[in-house]
Image: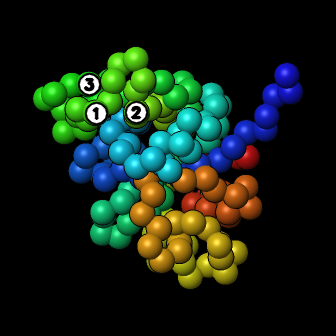
């Protein structure tokens, strides 16, 4: 079977819940709690080694704070079965889990975040999902040209 090329992603987290600094401290963490079917399906497409832009949502201003790497491919999200978790889903069954999570590892924190407004203002990022009105998905694919442009804007060390 042919190995697929690396895919690129954007993953959103509220910085007061889990930030790029938290991931830098922890090294590796599970990305749980995704409760949108389209975002979940994107996570199920992720492969070990894929890169993702780590986006701080619900921040002032929102923007890309760094880069993480997919460390473990999609597996059942344990929080869906935990009645004490805010992500509990009574309809999800262990024999047929509804929700998945992946593990991510820290790659790089940008010296300065690339704000959503800066990305919207950059003609080279036209068509990038996160810049489009109503883009609320917490996990989304990113075209290579857009990913590279954000890395360039951030003067990142990471290369794709």
- Point out which mark residue 157 bears: none
- Gap in Å between the C-alphas at discs 1 and 2? 8 Å
Secondary element at image label 1:
loop
Q: Residue at x 44, y 73 (%)?
A: 134
Dot 3 or dot 1: first in sequence order is 3
Q: Residue at x 19, y 39 (%)?
A: 86
Q: Earlier in the sequence, mark 3 or mark 2?
A: 3
- Label 1 vs 2, first from the N-terminus: 1
Q: CA distance from mark 3 to mark 2?
A: 10 Å
Front-most of residues 11 and 63: 11
- The N terminus lies in quadrant: top right
Residue 140 vs residue 61: left or right?
right
Q: Is residue 77 visible?
A: yes
Q: Is residue 14 above or below residue 82?
A: below
- Which residue was labeled with disc 3? 81
Identify the coloring.
Answer: rainbow
Marks 1/2 in contact by CB < 8 Å: the verdict is: yes
Above or below 27: residue 153: below
Q: Which residue is mark 2?
A: 98
* Front tag of 3 and 1: 1
Distance between the Cα atoms at labels 3 and 1? 9 Å
Could you tell me which residue is drawn at 50 percent across and 50 percent down?
38
Q: Which residue is mark 1?
A: 91
Question: Which structural element holds mark 3?
Answer: helix
Residue 22: image location, x then y, percent? 33, 38
- Residue 91: image location, x then y, percent: 28, 33
């Amino acid at each position: 079977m042919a190995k697929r090329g690396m895919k690129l992603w954007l993953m959103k987290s509220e910085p007061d819940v889990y930030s790029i600094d938290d991931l830098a401290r922890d090294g590796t963490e599970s990305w749980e709690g995704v409760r949108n079917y389209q975002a979940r399906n994107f996570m199920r497409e992720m492969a070990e080694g894929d890169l993702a832009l780590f986006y701080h949502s619900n921040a002032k201003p929102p923007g890309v704070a760094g880069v993480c790497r997919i460390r473990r491919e999609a597996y059942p999200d344990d929080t869906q079965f935990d009645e004490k978790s805010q992500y509990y889903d009574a309809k999800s069954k262990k024999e047929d889990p509804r929700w998945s999570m992946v593990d991510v590892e820290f790659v790089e924190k940008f010296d300065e975040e690339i704000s959503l407004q800066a990305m919207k203002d950059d003609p080279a990022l036209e068509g990038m999902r996160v810049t489009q009105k109503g883009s609320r998905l917490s996990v989304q694919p990113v075209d290579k040209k857009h990913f590279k442009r954000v890395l360039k804007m951030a003067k990142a060390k990471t290369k794709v």
